[in-house]
Image (cartoon, rainbow, N blue to C red):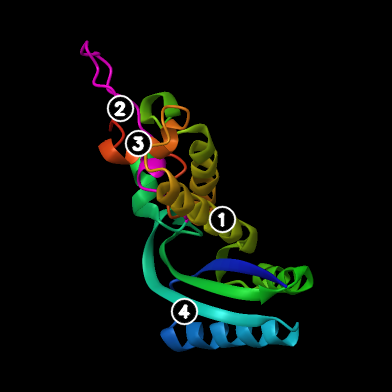
Amino acid sequence: MRTYEVVFVAAPTLSNEELEAFINHTQTVVEGKNGKVIKVDNWGKKSLAYKIKRYRDGYYVVLTLEGDGAMIAELERRFRVTDHVMRFISVRIDEDMKRSEKLKVMRQRKSASKPQPAASRPEINVNAEAHPPTEP
Amino acid sequence: MPAPKRFAIRRKRICKFCAEKITYIDYKDGKLLSHFIPERGKILPRRISGVCSTHQRQLSEAIKRARHLAILPFVAD
């Protein structure tokens, strides 16, 4: 089982009910492919950074799913044939999350054993004097 | 850390993500990413921002994903 994050942008012409119906429909597709919906995050209507199909805003929906490649393939196929889906992206996040967790654990261990690991590891040493990067 | 004896003209470069212990750069966080795109909409080079190579790679990927979703612009002026 893999964890995916699927984001899609729907056309602003949709009503809230239509959007809800489409999200529910997506969920049944996922479940039909033996996947699991972990989280649905509806951002609501947001303005776009640039115009898509002459629209200035769109509904952003973030889905966190568990399933396999076949599920994502089916989902993407459906997004492609659905006219009111303007953009979508599916990202596999389980490996990134695992890496992120690992780094967090490593960092904790390091700070517990030796709080000042000398100049060999400048990356971990910087927390004492954190400057924001120079803004242009 | 030993105190610097001479005052350098250049500011010490510190990776923002390392300092804040960010291990995963989220492409959905337009506010965070917008710090790294100047007015024109290009990705800020790391020789200016001071971001470390690992995070710069993650950052550029995140910015590209965000552009696709129209969270960030491709070009802006």
Judge left or right: residue A77 versus residue A4: right
Q: Is the residue under label 2 in contact with that under label 1 (CB below 8 Å)?
A: no
Above-or-below relation of B11 to A61: above
The residues tagged by marks 3 and 2 sit, at their Cα atoms, a distance apart of: 10 Å
Q: Is the residue under label 1 in contact with that under label 4 (CB below 8 Å)?
A: no
Q: Give residue A14's mark.
A: 4
- Tell me residue A56's x, y (percent): 39, 60
Q: Is the residue under label 3 in contact with that under label 1 (CB below 8 Å)?
A: no
Q: Which chain carries label 1?
A: A
Residue on which the image places disc 2: B1
The kind of residue tagged 2 is Met
Residues in magenta, as a range: B1-27
Above-or-below relation of B39 to A54: above
A72 is within the stretch colored magenta: no
- Tell me residue A19's x, y (percent): 49, 82
User: Does residue A123 show up?
Assistant: yes
Q: Nearer the viewer, mark 4 or mark 1?
A: 1
For marks 4 and 3, the one nearer the N-term is: 4
